[in-house]
Amino acid sequence: MTVSTNTAEQTYLDLCERIINEGEHRPDRTGTGTKSLFAPPQLRFNLSDDTFPLLTTKKVFSRAIIHELLWFVQGCTDAKKLSEKGVKIWEGNGSREYLDSIGLTDRREGDLGPVYGFQWRHFGAEYKDCDADYSGQGVDQLQDVIKKLKTNPYDRRIIMSAWNPPDFAKMALPPCHVFCQFYVNFPNETPDSNTNKQQKTSSRPKLSCLLYQRSCDMGLGVPFNIASYALLTKMIAHIVDMDCGEFIHTLGDAHVYLDHVDALKEQLVRTPKDFPKLIIKEERKDEIKSIDDFKFEDFEIIGYDPYGPIKMKMSV
């Protein structure tokens, strides 16, 4: 038996196995049915040295992760804009049939309402439709996070929330990953064994991110969420001139859909490989001064050698 050095991914796999074996059978909104555990131990991923926690025991659609995150950062809520880039993960929730089924009959197809991007960039603004211009409206939480990291990195309020109950009725889907907090570790002074004096280390501050996710689709959604928030941390760290520390994932209702069980059992017998690296291309680093400057082409994933893909159906 091969022993993996990738303990972070193995911890994720062990949790999936525990949910399958010990989880409570629970009905769910989609009618599919799940096995569920509440508030299991946190998942932790080291992001230092450009490490990118993209699962290796199945091929993860990294292109979709990057495009979706940039779509969030833009504040966009139009699923069609994402579909145009070949990323169709929001099409089910933006379909005419689905929007009509939840009472959003006046919403055009693809208009998801005030979902993640809107809450990140325009929290509190009145949502009209996905085609409106919201410039200067609401609270730009993402820019506020960046401002605090630059001006008061010890602040305990470096937080971004997508949880906005007054807007739920307008959303195609209330947020699953709802709340993240950022924390900066500063290099400690270390004792010099020769002089018995303190010497400052040369390393830069490290930015870590803690995510609380209320609803966690372990098979299909969580691998996306892990990589997405790791990438967001990497992007913000670049803007505020820091290195990356950790991504910590706190899960609420951690569940496996019943129609994912067989697929996950196939994944569970695979031994995790080392995570790849994700870098911001050198030729663009100096040009990216704002969170809005990032483009899809700015990122390069190095050394990703996953097992083959495993198909899992998305429950809508």
Image (cartoon, rainbow, N blue to C red):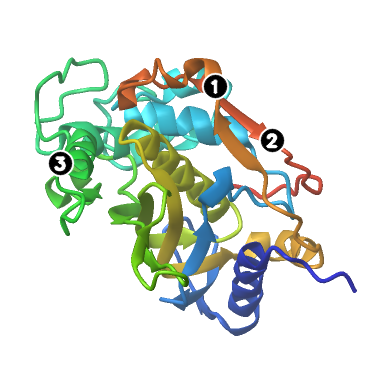
On screen, 283 above or below 209?
A: above
- Closest to the camera, between mark 2 and mark 1, is 1
Please give the residue where the numbered disc 1 appears in the rendered image: 282
Please give the residue where the numbered disc 3 appears in the rendered image: 151
Lateral position of residue 126 relative to residue 30, left or right: left
- Closest to the camera, between mark 2 and mark 3, is 3
Give how far apart the Cα atoms at labels 3 and 1 are. Answer: 26 Å
Mark 3 or mark 1: whose residue is earlier in sequence: 3
Circle 1 crowding by C-alpha within 10 Å: few under 14, some 14–19, many from 20: few
Please give the residue where the numbered disc 2 appears in the rendered image: 302
SS label for mark 1:
helix
Q: From where the camera sits, is residue 77 visible? A: no
Lateral position of residue 263 relative to residue 34, left or right: right
Residue 68, x across and y down, in percent: 46, 32
Residue 27, x across and y down, in percent: 47, 69
Mark 2 or mark 1: whose residue is earlier in sequence: 1
| Res 199 quadrant in image | bottom left
Q: Mark 2: which amino acid? A: Ile
Q: Mark 3: which amino acid? A: Thr
